[in-house]
Image: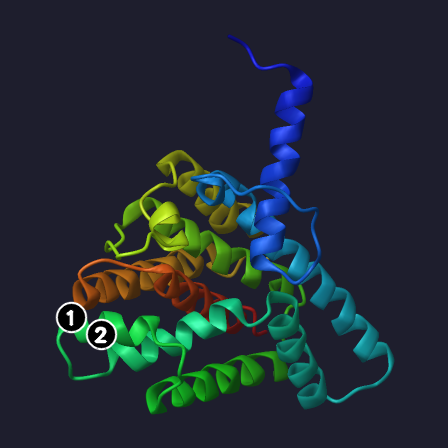
């Protein structure tokens, strides 16, 4: 039985708002969440990342117009991203750092991932990550990478969602609804867009460099999968932060 066009449009908007509400602090209409809604909304993740980038792109030129210094611009842009995303992926990065660098067994590492308290490795991990982002943004950056970087980070999330498996928890988490549930066609389309399309105005071996960054993201995911014997939502956030930061360094002139 064919779907009515109005029903199809309603579903599209529903999944758009799910993606927007999950990834950003922008208010969305209230709705009843259903099983696997997040995995169906994932097709919009890179678009949401692009909109975050567009906001920072405009903010960048506004600060340039106001003659703000490079370091001030970098700090404001880093802060803007944290506010817009509510630190969602940064929290995952910190939890993974705490768990990944511990010397405990797999079960204890999983417990550390779920622990909301921030440990030493988590603090150091956040500090280093924000330092690298600030350094990348303080240098001569091609402004288009302010858009490409958050898009690439959310595309890396799709790689985890399509190519890896979650570990089961006592209470089913959003990670289990997302990891291993993304169709490979969606992953391939977004990888193709991020690797090939920007070639027309960037050049300089960009496709090879972009492919290498995504490969590093895949290797990092593989390492986490081996360490935790499966992945969780925190691992997705960690990969997003890693790939987004590496893409910022690709954008240096």
Q: Tag 2's secondary structure?
A: helix
- Position in image of residue 220 (x %, y %): 29, 66
- Please state, as top left, top right, bottom left or bottom right, where the C terminus lies in the image: bottom right
Q: Along the line of sight, which residue is nearer the eye, 180 or 195?
A: 180
Is residue 193 something that shows in the picture?
A: yes
- Position in image of residue 121 (x %, y %): 34, 87
Residue at coordinates 83% horizontally, 73% vertically from top-left? 62
Question: Residue furthest toward the left?
Answer: 105
- Count of number-bearing discs: 2
Q: Tag 1's secondary structure?
A: helix
Residue at coordinates 23% horizontally, 60% vertically from top-left? 222
Disc assigned to residue 106: 1
Disc assigned to residue 197: none
- Position in image of residue 31 (x %, y %): 62, 42
Question: Residue furthest toward the right?
Answer: 66
Residue at coordinates 43% horizontally, 39% vertically from top-left? 35
Q: Name the residue under label 2.
A: 109
Answer left or right for 198 relative to 70.
left
Q: Along the line of sight, which residue is nearer the eye, 59 or 103?
A: 103
Residue at coordinates 69% horizontally, 50% vertically from top-left? 28
Q: Along the line of sight, which residue is nearer the eye, 191 or 251?
A: 191
Q: In which quarter of the image is residue 36?
A: top left
Q: How far apart are marks 2 and 1 (CA)?
A: 5 Å
> According to the image, what is the colour scheme of the structure?
rainbow
At label 2, counting other C-alpha atoms closer than 10 Å, the crowd grade (few under 14, some 14-19, many 20 or more) is: many
At label 1, counting other C-alpha atoms closer than 10 Å, the crowd grade (few under 14, some 14-19, many 20 or more) is: some
Is residue 140 something that shows in the picture?
A: no
Q: In which quarter of the image is residue 66?
A: bottom right
Q: Quadrant of residue 171?
A: bottom left
Q: Do the residues labelled 2 and 1 touch (CB within 8 Å)?
A: yes
In the rendered view, would you say 80 is above or below 23? below
């Amino acid at each position: 039985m064919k779907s009515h066009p109005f029903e199809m449009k309603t579903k599209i908007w529903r999944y758009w708002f799910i993606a927007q509400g999950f990834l950003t602090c922008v208010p969305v209409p209230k709705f009843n969440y259903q099983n696997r809604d997040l995995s169906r909304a994932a097709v919009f993740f890179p678009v949401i990342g692009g909109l975050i980038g567009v906001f920072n792109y405009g903010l960048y030129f506004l600060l340039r117009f106001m003659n703000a210094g490079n370091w001030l611009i970098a700090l404001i842009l880093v802060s803007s991203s944290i506010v817009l995303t509510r630190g969602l992926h940064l929290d995952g990065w910190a939890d993974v750092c705490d768990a990944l660098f511990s010397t405990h067994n797999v079960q204890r590492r999983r417990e550390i991932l779920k622990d909301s308290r921030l440990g030493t490795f988590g603090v150091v991990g956040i500090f280093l990550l924000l330092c690298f982002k600030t350094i990348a943004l303080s240098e001569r950056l091609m402004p288009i990478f302010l858009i490409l970087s958050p898009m690439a980070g959310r595309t890396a999330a799709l790689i985890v969602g399509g190519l890896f498996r979650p570990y089961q928890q006592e209470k089913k988490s959003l990670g289990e609804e997302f990891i291993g549930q993304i169709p490979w066609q969606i992953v391939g389309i977004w990888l193709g867009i991020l690797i090939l399309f920007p070639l027309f105005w960037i050049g300089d071996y960009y496709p090879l460099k972009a492919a290498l960054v995504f490969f590093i993201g895949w290797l990092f995911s593989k390492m986490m999968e081996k360490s935790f014997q499966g992945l969780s939502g925190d691992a997705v956030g960690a990969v997003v932060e890693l790939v987004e930061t590496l893409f910022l360094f690709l954008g240096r002139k």
